[in-house]
Image (cartoon, rainbow, N blue to C red):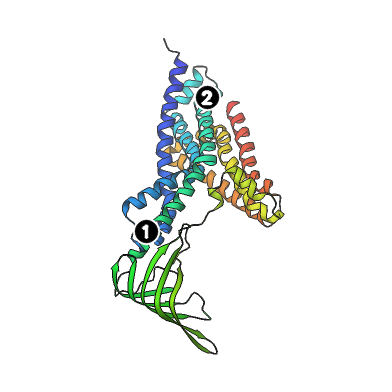
Amino acid sequence: MRSPLKIVHRAILKELAVTFSLSLIFLNFILMMEKVLRLSRILSGVGASVSDMARIIFYLQPQIMILTIPMSLLLATLLTYGRLNADNELTILKTAGMSFGGISLPVLLFGSLCFVMGLLVSFSLGPFGAGKVRDTIARIVTQKAPMAIEAGIFNTSFRDIVILVRNKPAPDEMRGIFIYDSRNPKEPKVLSAKEGRVYADREYNLSLYMKDGFIHIVRPGGSTEIFFSGYNLSLNLSTEGPTRKNSEMTPRELLKEAQGKEPKGKIPFLLELHRRLSLPSLCLLLMFLGPPLSLLSGKSGRLGGLTIGLGVFTVFYIMLVYGENMARTGKIPHYVGAWLPTLIIGISSLLAFRKAGAR
């Protein structure tokens, strides 16, 4: 026969898991929208398909989960234990002789699992997903950007460049090319060529190779015309293209990049490494903060738990961003800026848990 305590713990764990999953999906969707809207401005101009966007959304998930795993843990704890408190089930368990620590055992176990999950995402899946997003965007751009240039229509998909072609015998071949290049405002250029071809190198850099044409360069003191038999023009998207960021680097790569640099040059890499550690570690602290906070939110229903949870994370994230900015300017050491918000949350969590257990 199973112990009544194990039955209670199993029921609470099941409710925690369901609520955590729903919270994770909800928060990932909310935080993902900003990234998707920003990327859509890049990809819509080159004709990205629905499957392309779905692939990018899938690869974005690990990067977002670095932040949403601890957020979902706190929300799941507040909603689950808040519901138990609202239904007076916590009072019944205490009357039956169960301590507050015993009642909180399921969230302590679940928080430890979230900590391991957070480390896996932060150190492995996150960098992998970030690299995949960059490669996928680059591949889509290089494959479909030539198709975005239509005959007889002014194309502005490329930054500070307007392209007009008379006809296109093939997707990457053009004839009757006219280009206005204003990337250098002091010396705008007008290019014209009989034919050309768009191609990409191994680094996913787009170029337009043109034959039999001329370049008209306007300068403050006059103008210059240059005739060419072959000319290579590099193309850049109207929005910044994908570049390798710190979020794509593994911890070993971050440490390697930090070595040999000046103190100010090390800070961005070290802050990224600290964030990879501090956000998963937050799960170990929030599992002590959630049950005491649920005593406050229980009587106000699920909306109260959601409000308190988002409020805690808003305060934490503001402190984290402020501390990292202070570290970047050299006003405080980088480890202080990275870990002080976590330390504050940790002390508050332990004090709240101890106070709730003493009641």
Instruction: Choose between 324 and 47: the one closer to the eye.
Output: 47
Instruction: Choose between 356 and 331: the one closer to the eye.
Output: 331
The residue mark sitting in front, 1 or 2, is: 1
Q: Secondary structure at mark 2?
A: helix
Estimate the x, y position of residue 79 in percent, counting from the top left. Answer: 44, 35
Q: Residues within 10 Å of mark 2 (few under 14, many from 20)?
A: some
Instruction: Choose between 337 and 44: the one closer to the eye.
Output: 44
Quick one: label 1 or label 2, which is nearer the N terminus? 2
Q: Secondary structure at mark 1?
A: helix
Quarter holding residue 207? bottom left
Residue under pointer 2 = 105
Q: Is residue 67 visible?
A: no
Q: Residues within 10 Å of mark 1 (few under 14, many from 20)?
A: many
Q: Amino acid at mark 1?
A: Gln
Estimate the x, y position of residue 93 in percent, counting from the top left. Answer: 48, 21
Q: Against 102, is 130 above or below?
A: below
Residue under pointer 1 = 143
> What quarter of the picture does the N terminus occupy?
top left
For residue 82, side relative to residue 263 (left or right): left
Q: Against 335, is 35 above or below?
A: below
Cα separation, mark 1 vs mark 2, equals 53 Å
